[in-house]
Amino acid sequence: MTYRRLLIAGLAASAILPRVAGAQAWNQQFGNVAVGLLAQSITASRQQALAAGTEPVPQLIVQGLAGYFQPGLEQAVRWRGTGTTELSLPGMAFQYGDAAAITLIDVVLFRSDADARHDLKLWAH
């Protein structure tokens, strides 16, 4: 089953099942499964981005956000631009949502390289 079909099935079930008697326990189990799948998807997408190549936070962004984050954080965070269209968590956020960026633990994926290099507000999201 593809991620897209699994997501659609989960959304449909979460809308219908609360109305069914005794569905609370099933909803809890489904929620636990959904959380696990989301965590796996975030981790896998992060690994794919790192494998494809990431860059350190641009110096312009580091200077512009100085004082808003703990020192050294900019060294731990990496980014990758030119949003993906593959069937993945970031791909779906860029293709079907209006996301300009998505954070995957310590890797930020941007739809646009220009935004990644210059948009302070987007980095602060």
Image: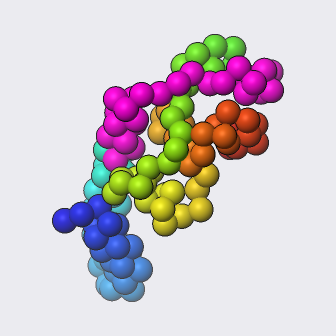
Between 105 and 93, the one lying in front of the other is: 93
Measured as percent of width and height from the top left, residue 31 is found at 35, 60
Colour mode? rainbow
* Magenta stretch: includes residue 48: yes
* Magenta stretch: includes residue 109: no
**In the figure, 37 relative to 125: above or below?**
below
Between 95 and 66, the one lying in front of the other is: 95
Between 48 and 34, the one lying in front of the other is: 48
Tell whether 1 sits left or right of 10.
left
Between 67 and 23, the one lying in front of the other is: 67
Q: Quadrant of residue 3?
A: bottom left
Tell whether 82 sits left or right of 122.
left
The answer to whether one can see residue 100 in this image is yes
For image coordinates 34% across by 29% down, the residue present is 51
**In the figure, 95 relative to 24: above or below?**
above
Measured as percent of width and height from the top left, residue 28 is found at 33, 63
**In the figure, 55 relative to 108: above or below?**
above
Q: Quadrant of residue 27?
A: bottom left
For image coordinates 62% across by 24% down, the residue present is 57
Region rendered in magenta: 41-69
Magenta stretch, main secondary structure, is helix
The answer to whether one can see residue 101 in this image is no
For image coordinates 19% across by 65% down, the residue present is 1
Measured as percent of width and height from the top left, residue 41 is found at 34, 47
Q: Which image quarter is the C terminus in?
A: top right
**In the figure, 29 relative to 73: above or below?**
below
Q: Quadrant of residue 34?
A: bottom left
For image coordinates 66% across by 40% down, the residue present is 114
Tell whether 54 sits left or right of 122.
left
Measured as percent of width and height from the top left, residue 77 is found at 55, 25
Total numbered labels:
0
